[in-house]
Amino acid sequence: MPKQVYNVVINSLNSTLETISNATSNKSYYVDWSDRMPQGKYILSFTFISEGNVVTNFATIPVVYSDIASSSNSTFPVAPNIYSNTQILGTLYPTSIMPGTNTCCFRADTTSNPSIYLNNRPFNNLFTIQILNNSSPPLAYLDEAATPASIGIYMLILHFELYELY
């Protein structure tokens, strides 16, 4: 049987009304998962591209967080030998837009972050996407412009590959 793939395109301009005025680094979205995907085990990967930001020395790493997956195999060390489930989907990397300037977009593709195994399709129809930095604790990502700005408007494509039906 050919693998079943479900792509969900997230445009930061199309967030919920409650978060439309939020910084781009903190948006919520609504998807009726039961209407789009059967229950089953999935492999989740994503691609991402943003509009321009200023990066001079890449002082902090932008990290994509989401509460989309209630049960996955991603863990994060919170202390030596202590691990906790995490909402991290992956990291973003800068790509120069205009040579000779500090303007870049942030990107991720299916090869820049490992896939995440989901024990079931998402059930959380209202979910949040946050772009935070790698500080401890993480804070909203801000670029390195003279007046720091949130990450640029973005497109995030969530790629769900059905692994096993329930």
Image (cartoon, rainbow, N blue to C red):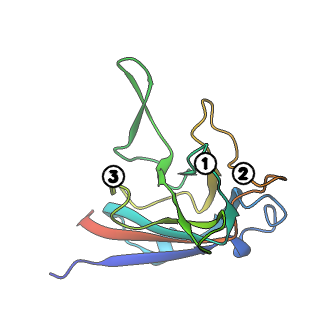
The answer to whether 58 is drawn above or below residue 80 in the figure is below
The C terminus - image quarter: bottom left
**Residue 48 vs residue 17: left or right?**
left
Mark 1 vs 2: CB contact within 8 A? yes
Q: Mark 2 or mark 3: which comes first in sequence?
A: 3
**Residue 140 vs residue 77: left or right?**
right
The answer to whether 70 is drawn above or below residue 86 in the figure is below
Of the two numbered discs 3 and 1 in the rendering, the one whose residue sits closer to the viewer: 1
**Kind of residue sitting beneath label 1:** Asn
Q: CA distance from mark 2 to mark 3?
A: 38 Å
Find residue 17 and report its horizontal and vertical position in percent.
81, 68
Q: CA distance from mark 1 to mark 2?
A: 8 Å
Of the two numbered discs 2 and 3 in the rendering, the one whose residue sits closer to the viewer: 2
> Which one is in front, 98 or 161?
98
The residue that appears at 65% across and 56% down in the rendered structure is: 55
So how many labels did they put on this image?
3
On the image, which quarter does residue 94 sit in?
bottom right
The answer to whether 35 is drawn above or below residue 125 in the figure is below
The answer to whether 131 is drawn above or below residue 99 in the figure is above
Residue pointed to by mark 2:
144
**Residue 24 vs residue 18: left or right?**
left
Residue pointed to by mark 1:
57
The residue that appears at 61% across and 43% down in the rendered structure is: 59
> Which one is in front, 37 or 143?
143
Residue pointed to by mark 3:
119
The residue that appears at 71% across and 75% down in the rendered structure is: 14
Q: Residue furthest bottom?
A: 2
The N terminus - image quarter: bottom left
